[in-house]
Image (cartoon, rainbow, N blue to C red):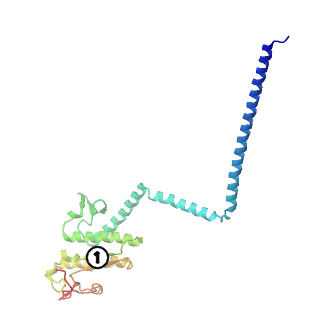
């Protein structure tokens, strides 16, 4: 005779086994559904991407653009090299050396004081310095007004010549107002002819104007010096350059122009 308790335990075990099998089947079914959903989403994305790519127009040949891109990249690298701080300083030092040699030659031509010593342009103080055996002499300690006029003139013209020769975007003119005044004060001669000054001063006045003329001519008229001047040198090269004489009532600003006062 069978034991009822044993049969009950067997039935419970079967029920537990069946339940576990059903849960396993449900889990497998859920995982399969997830896989199907993921596959559907992938197919949808791939379909959209494919449709977008098919709608794009044919791209032109990009080889020319690639070559241009490589050229520009090379140009950028060269500019980085050229604009390197150390290289820029070396380049400026080289230019200053060339300008200094030019100014030294011109100072001797104008017979300026300290012209026997090497000259240099001091960029920090914006002045010209003569390196003498006794030490540097800046322009404000070079003595007379004649020297100041001469050194200002050679400094300006040396810079402008450099800019013109290299076609730099700097205005190509220099305006000077009465550079001869240190030799020839305007009240000494109403006619402007410099007969009242010494022979040495007359030669010095003529020398600075002749120098300015020669520098402009050497730049093949690519540069202009505009001078308002009281002295009137009786030389053909000077007289031929005179545009207007404001004397005996003729003025740059006429007396009958309206006044604001």
Residue plotted at (33% across, 64% down): 100
Identity of the residue furthest to the top in this view: 1
Q: Residues within 10 Å of mark 1 (few under 14, many from 20)?
A: few
* Rendered position, 70 above or below 242: above
Residue toward you, 65 or 58: 58
Image-quadrant location for residue 126: bottom left
**Which residue is at the far right?**
1
Which residue corresponds to the image point at 24% horizontal and 69% vertical from the top-left? 112
At x 15%, y 83%, the residue is: 189
Q: Nearer the viewer, residue 215 or 2?
A: 2
Q: Is residue 14 left or right of residue 257?
A: right
Residue 52 % position (x, y): 67, 59
Rendered residue at 73%/44% (across/down)? 36
Q: Position of residue 61 (x, y in %)?
A: 66, 65
Q: Position of residue 194 (x, y in %)?
A: 18, 82
Which quadrant would the N terminus be assigned to in this image?
A: top right
Above or below, 137 relative to 112: above
Q: Which SS class for mark 1?
A: strand
Q: Is residue 75 left or right of residue 154?
A: right
Residue 19 as seen in the image, left or right of residue 214:
right
Rendered location of residue 17, percent (x, y)? 77, 25
Where is mark 1, residue-wise? 175
The picture quadrant where one finds residue 125 is bottom left
Q: Nearer the viewer, residue 9 or 126?
A: 9
Name the image quarter holding residue 150. bottom left
Q: Is residue 90 above or below residue 106?
A: above
Number of marks in the rendered image: 1
Q: In the rendered view, would you say 194 is above or below 103?
A: below
Question: Which quadrant holds the C terminus?
Answer: bottom left
């Amino acid at each position: 005779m069978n034991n009822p308790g044993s049969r009950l335990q067997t039935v419970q075990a079967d029920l537990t086994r069946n339940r576990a099998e059903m849960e396993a089947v449900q889990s497998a079914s859920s995982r399969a559904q997830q896989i199907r959903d993921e596959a559907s989403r992938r197919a949808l994305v791939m379909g959209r991407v494919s449709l977008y790519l098919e709608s794009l127009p044919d791209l032109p040949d990009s080889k020319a653009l690639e070559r241009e891109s490589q050229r520009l990249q090379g140009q950028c690298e060269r500019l980085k090299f050229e604009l390197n701080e150390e290289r820029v300083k070396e380049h400026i030092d080289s230019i200053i050396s060339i300008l200094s040699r030019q100014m030294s030659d011109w100072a001797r031509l104008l017979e300026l004081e300290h012209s026997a010593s090497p000259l240099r342009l001091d960029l920090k103080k914006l002045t010209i310095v003569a390196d003498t055996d006794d030490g540097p002499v800046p322009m404000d300690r070079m003595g007379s007004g004649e020297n100041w006029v001469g050194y200002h003139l050679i400094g300006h013209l040396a810079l402008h010549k450099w800019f013109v020769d290299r076609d730099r975007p700097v205005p190509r003119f220099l305006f000077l107002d009465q550079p001869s005044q240190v030799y020839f004060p305007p009240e000494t001669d109403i006619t402007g002819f410099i007969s009242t000054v010494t022979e040495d001063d007359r030669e010095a006045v003529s020398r600075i104007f002749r120098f300015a003329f020669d520098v402009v001519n050497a730049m093949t008229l690519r540069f202009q010096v505009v001078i308002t001047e009281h002295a009137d040198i009786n030389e053909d090269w000077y007289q031929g350059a005179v545009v207007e004489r404001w004397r005996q009532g003729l003025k740059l600003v006429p007396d009958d122009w309206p006044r604001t006062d």
